[in-house]
Image: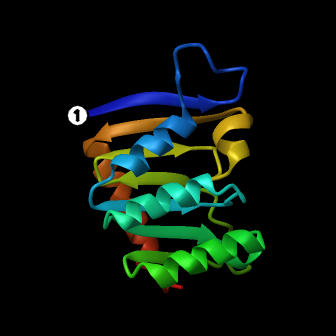
Amino acid sequence: MSNIDIVVSGLGWMGSGIGSIESAIEDLLGNAQSEILLSTYAIGQADRIFDLLEFALARGVRVMMVVNRPAKQHVSVQHRLEYLSNKYAHFHLYPFQPDEKQGDLHAKVLVADRQAALIGSSNLSYSGMVINHELAVLIRGTEASRIAEVIDGLISNIAPF
């Protein structure tokens, strides 16, 4: 059985008793004990997401991250991804490089310990987590493991960076 909550960003939705995307991401990354799976279309230049990832990596949490077209991300993001790859053997970056027959990876998914998953419209950026009007679903329970299996399937078809 799964527990489902809705989380949002953007002032128009905040204050209505619904949790925030930023808090959900902080909670999932801050409390992960063994594994974090991420897929993202875009990463903002804000250091917060990288600080949270590095905090998890420093605790020994394995991070597997699929990034759409990493070479198209801002140069500062590319440097941070390279830094994490070089510093932590348990940080695995998978570049999603679509060709003309396949579209971009647009899924924004975060799974922690196969027990909790966040799926929504928000990119990993300050705008996506705080400013833009975004919506995500936070799923805790058995379905989070199934979501992790879907990410595993994607990763199995991508050579690591």
The residue to which callout 1 is attached is: 1
- Using residue 7 as the reference point, say whether residue 43 is left or right of it: right
Q: Is residue 132 above or below residue 17?
A: below
Q: Looking at the picture, how far across and down is residue 21, in whole percent?
A: 55, 36
Quadrant for the C terminus, please. bottom right
Q: Residue at x 43, y 74 (%)?
A: 91
Q: Residue at x 65, y 51 (%)?
A: 123
- Using residue 20 as the reference point, say whether residue 129 is left or right of it: right
Q: Is residue 1 above or below residue 70?
A: above
Q: Looking at the picture, how far across and down is residue 124, in whole percent?
A: 62, 53
Quadrant for the N terminus, please. top left
Q: Nearer the viewer, residue 12 or 86?
A: 86
Q: Residue at x 31, y 44 (%)?
A: 143
Q: Looking at the picture, how far across and down is residue 33, in whole percent?
A: 27, 56
Tell me the amino acid under the disc marked 1.
Answer: Met
The image quarter containing residue 99 is bottom right
Q: Nearer the viewer, residue 113 or 148?
A: 113
Q: Is residue 25 above or below residue 23?
A: below
Q: Is residue 158 visible?
A: no
- Using residue 96 as the reference point, say whether residue 76 is left or right of it: right
Q: Nearer the viewer, residue 13 or 148?
A: 13
